[in-house]
Image: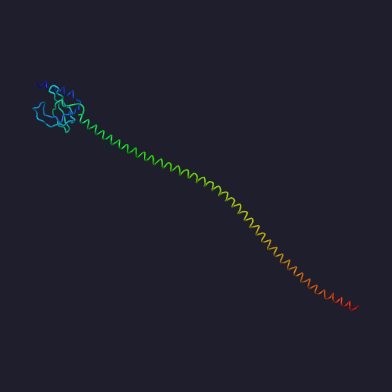
């Protein structure tokens, strides 16, 4: 009997060489015992959804030797084990995942709203920049026109300044000529006056003689 048990145990070990994980079924709790039967001592109570590492399977007695989280090893009934998680655990996981997805969705909506707001701000900024660009273009064109006018005015001013300088030189020349004419006129009048005075003196000397000669002629007659 012991040999048969050892052979079964060896076969079970070979079959389960790769550790397999199973879960406690939807039953609220199951018992982990020291042996394969209700007469063995209960090591601990395993709640539903507890992951167990399968170490050995005894199909004949309907028990499996398992290792619970924490390293405790014992025997549990096969019918309370299942390959997938319990429905309650799956539901909890699904609810948790749903909550995470809802939170992520809210974050995405918030991010989308922020992006839309940023897009609106960017559109406003772009519109403002376009208006500023148009305004600056107009100002630049006006500056160019003003600069062209300024250059033309500057050239005209330079020409006028040249003409003014020429006129000033002509004026100085005319003023000098006028001064010369004034001086010549004064000299001429001086000469005329002197001539008149001299002529008067000569006449003053000649006329009495003429009268004296006439008188003498009358006296001779």
In the image: residue 102, left or right of residue 130: left
List x then y, in percent, for residue 45.
Answer: 13, 32
**In terms of image quadrants, where is residue 111?**
top left
List x then y, in percent, for residue 70.
Answer: 16, 33
Count of marks placed on residues: 0
List x then y, in percent, for residue 81.
Answer: 17, 27
Considering the image in quadrants, where does the N terminus appear? Answer: top left
Front-most of residues 124 and 33: 124
List x then y, in percent, for residue 196.
Answer: 77, 70
Front-most of residues 218 and 2: 218
**In terms of image quadrants, where is residue 80?**
top left
Considering the image in quadrants, where does the C terminus appear? Answer: bottom right
Vertical comparison of 12 with 145: above or below: above
Front-most of residues 40 and 100: 100
In the image: residue 46, left or right of residue 181: left
In the image: residue 134, left or right of residue 75: right
Q: As drawn, which residue projects farthest toward the right?
A: 221
Vertical comparison of 138 with 30: above or below: below
Q: As drawn, which residue projects farthest toward the bottom?
A: 219
In the image: residue 220, left or right of residue 177: right
**In terms of image quadrants, where is residue 218?**
bottom right
Vertical comparison of 68 with 59: above or below: below
């Amino acid at each position: 009997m012991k040999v048969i048990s050892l052979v079964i145990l060896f076969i079970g070990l070979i079959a389960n060489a790769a550790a397999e994980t199973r879960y406690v079924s939807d039953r609220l709790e199951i018992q982990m015992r020291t042996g394969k039967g209700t007469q063995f001592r209960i090591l601990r109570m395993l709640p539903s959804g507890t992951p167990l590492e399968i170490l050995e399977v005894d199909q004949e007695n309907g028990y499996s030797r398992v290792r619970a989280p924490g390293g405790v090893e014992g025997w549990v009934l096969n019918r309370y084990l299942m390959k997938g998680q319990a429905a309650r655990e799956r539901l909890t996981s699904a609810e948790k995942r749903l909550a995470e997805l809802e939170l992520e969705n809210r974050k995405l909506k918030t991010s989308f709203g922020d992006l839309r707001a940023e897009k609106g701000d960017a559109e406003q900024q772009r519109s403002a920049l376009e208006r500023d660009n148009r305004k600056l273009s107009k100002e630049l064109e006006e500056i160019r026109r003003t600069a062209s006018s300024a250059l033309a005015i500057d050239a005209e001013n330079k020409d006028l300044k040249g003409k003014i300088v020429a006129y000033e030189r002509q004026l100085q020349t005319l003023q000098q000529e006028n001064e010369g004419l004034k001086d010549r006129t004064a000299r001429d009048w001086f000469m005329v006056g002197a001539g008149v005075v001299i002529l008067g003196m000569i006449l003053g000397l000649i006329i009495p003689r003429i009268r004296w000669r006439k008188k003498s002629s009358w006296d001779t007659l």
